[in-house]
Image (cartoon, helix red, strand yellow):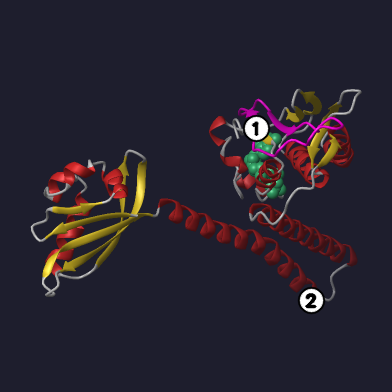
Amino acid sequence: EGVIAIDRSENVLHLNLAAARLLETDREAAIGRSVADVTGVREVREILTRALGEAREITLETKLYTGAGKRKIEMRASPLRDSDGRLAGAVLVFNDVTELRRLEAVRRDFVANVSHELKTPVTAIRGLVETLIDDAEMPADRKLDFLRRIRDQSLRLSSLITDLLTVSRVESGEWAPELERLDLREIAQRSMRYLRPFGEAKGLEMGLDVPDVPVLAWADADAMRQIVDNLLDNAVKYTPLGGRIRVRVRADGAFGTVEVEDTGVGIGPKYHGRIFERFYRVDKARSRELGGTGLGLAIVKHLVQAQAGAVSVESDIGKGSLFRVRMPAAPTAGEEPPIPTPLDDKGA
Ligand SMILES: Nc1ncnc2c1ncn2[C@@H]1O[C@H](COP(=O)(O)OP(=O)(O)OP(=O)(O)O)[C@@H](O)[C@H]1O
Ligand SMILES: [Mg+2]
């Protein structure tokens, strides 16, 4: 919180450290000098002049360009009075609300996104049910088709809600991983078993490379399954007919690594950071058509980080994608388990 006080002739009486930093001025040298000389920031001079001139409190929010980039600053200026109640100057208090405003925007977007994603299947279900009610003479096969579509939309709704609950539990810190000695080969094999039929239905070649010896990570089994399922699900979804998918597991010094590689549509480098955000999809229309809501990678990132692992991506448009998850290796017998310190998420 920055504070600057001026007297009636607009000379600086007091300037605290935070204010000096924000206004990029020297604190010692500022005292006694005119506020106009001390700072080039027009908003600061104006609000002080107004508080003096109008003898009342004035608040406003403004953007300042500082050494630290564009900051949103909330300013509150009030007149100062001496012991006789006469106007003696003005004091300005300001707060950097950049981060606060950013969080507010994230929350607003989140609520808007959730509402939209929930509304789509609900609207579809309603329409289908209403048609069934109104059309008593509908042929049996058409009726069955409607019922199937209702079931699919309900499934989508429930998986969406499960994903949302996962994101919020992990993000709020309510969920804590149950770390254990885990063979990453088994995780990969299980995900492969589960998703292979979907890939093969699209004519994809699905391959799994695992070493002959266990790759032991210090990780949570459920979380690791969800992570690899999500990555493999994406690989299958975003790889067109006839492509290749490879899942690789290997011991990598202090880490156990799982890689999911595909020959699919790929992701331009400028999106590599964004795809891990909630609801972010590179091609909204295509993802939605494929039933995606953009939560998969947000879940992956949060689950990986909660276990002190790291996830990264290598990809370019038309060149396929490689997602790599690195987990701390399990301690060998008798050794202390690794202390979970977050790794650097290079490229993520
Ligand atoms: N293997 C991949 N190849 C190409 N693009 C990908 C791949 N994985 C992710 N993406 C891109 O990143 C976006 C975010 O992925 P994410 O898994 O979070 O969402 P989704 O798959 O669209 O939906 P959900 O996982 O919630 O069903 C996708 O919409 C897609 O644009
Ligand atoms: Mg996904």
Span colored in magenta: 314-343
Q: In this rendering, which labeled residue sits more in front, label 1 or label 2? A: 1
Q: Residue at x 78, y 45 (%)?
A: 223
Residue 268 at x, y percent in the picture: 57, 31
Give the quadrant of ligand 2: top right
Q: Is residue 120 above or below residue 321?
A: below
**Looking at the picture, which amino acid does disc 2 mark?**
Ile
Q: Which residue is mark 1?
A: 312
Element under disc 1: strand
Total marks in image: 2
Describe residue 60's horizontal placement relative to residue 118 as left or right. Answer: left
Furthest residue in direction left, as rendered: 9
Q: Which residue is mark 2?
A: 133
Mark 1 → mark 2, Cα distance in angstroms: 50 Å
Structural crowding at the residue carrying mark 1, measured as other residues with C-alpha within 10 Å and reported as few (<14), some (14–19) or many (≥20)? some
Residue 229 at x, y percent in the picture: 79, 42
Disc 2 within 8 angstroms of ligand 1 (CB): no
Residue 281 at x, y percent in the picture: 61, 44
Residue 213 at x, y percent in the picture: 90, 24
Q: Residue at x 68, y 28 (%)?
A: 320
Task: Please state, as top left, top right, bottom left or bottom right, where the C terminus lies in the image.
Answer: top right
Please state which of residues 96 and 19 is positioned toward the viewer in this rendering. 19
